[in-house]
Image: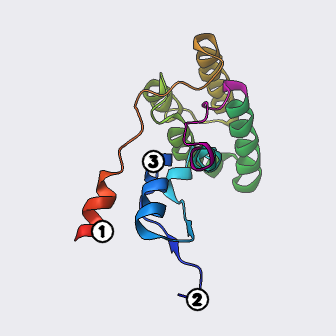
Amino acid sequence: MRIPVIANRDIDSPEKARAVLERTGADGIMIGRAAQGRPWIFREIRHYLDRGEHALPPRVEEARQIIVDHLADHYAFYGELAGVRIARKHLGWYATDLVGGETFRREVNQLESIAAQIAAVHRFFDQLAAYSDRLTYLSAPVSASWVEEALAA
């Protein structure tokens, strides 16, 4: 082909990114849903492709700042009523697979104000920081076996 080919479809880990690129010969990949709540996935994939090893997870304080900045922009755009409600899904995505994330998600889904959501974010990240200086995920990366199955079909 004379045009760049971009592969996508549920690429949600560095392993899947590498497997798709190797198997398809695509010029690049597109990340969609996997970046929701995990905007650092792009650098994780780049690190893995460049070095063949996983990057360290983001520091808790870096993730906290990204989320607080995101929420500030979010609330400024939507206002308090809609902003708080819509922020619930974003906060749920940020907490996915993190230690204590499910409890945090349930808590923020009940909150009705910007101040309460921001306070909950800080409590959650204070708890994470007490556990480790880096984000701690509950699950291991998913294997890329689906790539083989999809391409064989």
Vertical side of 6 occupied by 108: above or below: above
Q: Residues within 10 Å of mark 2 (few under 14, many from 20)?
A: few
Residues under labels 1 and 2: Cα distance? 22 Å
Q: Is residue 115 left or right of residue 106?
A: right
> Between disc 3 and disc 1, whose residue precedes?
3
Res 2 label: 2
Q: Residues within 10 Å of mark 1 (few under 14, many from 20)?
A: few
Res 15 label: 3
Identify which amino acid the numbered label 2 is placed on. Arg
Q: What span is colored magenta in the figure? A: 48-61
Q: Nearer the viewer, residue 49 or 132?
A: 49
Q: Residues within 10 Å of mark 3 (few under 14, many from 20)?
A: many
Residue at 55% x, 37% y is: 53
Residues under labels 3 and 1: Cα distance? 16 Å
- Residue 103 at x, y percent in the picture: 45, 24
Residue at 54% x, 59% y is: 31
Residue 13 visible in image: no
Vertical side of 85 occupied by 136: above or below: above
Residue at 63% x, 48% y is: 50
Residues under labels 2 and 3: Cα distance? 27 Å
Q: Nearer the viewer, residue 92 or 4?
A: 4
Residue lying furthest left in this view? 153
Res 151 label: 1
Colour pattern = rainbow
> Between disc 2 and disc 3, whose residue precedes?
2
- At numbered mark 3, what does the secondary structure look like: helix, strand or loop? helix
- At numbered mark 2, what does the secondary structure look like: helix, strand or loop? loop
- At numbered mark 1, what does the secondary structure look like: helix, strand or loop? helix
- Residue 95 at x, y percent in the picture: 52, 34
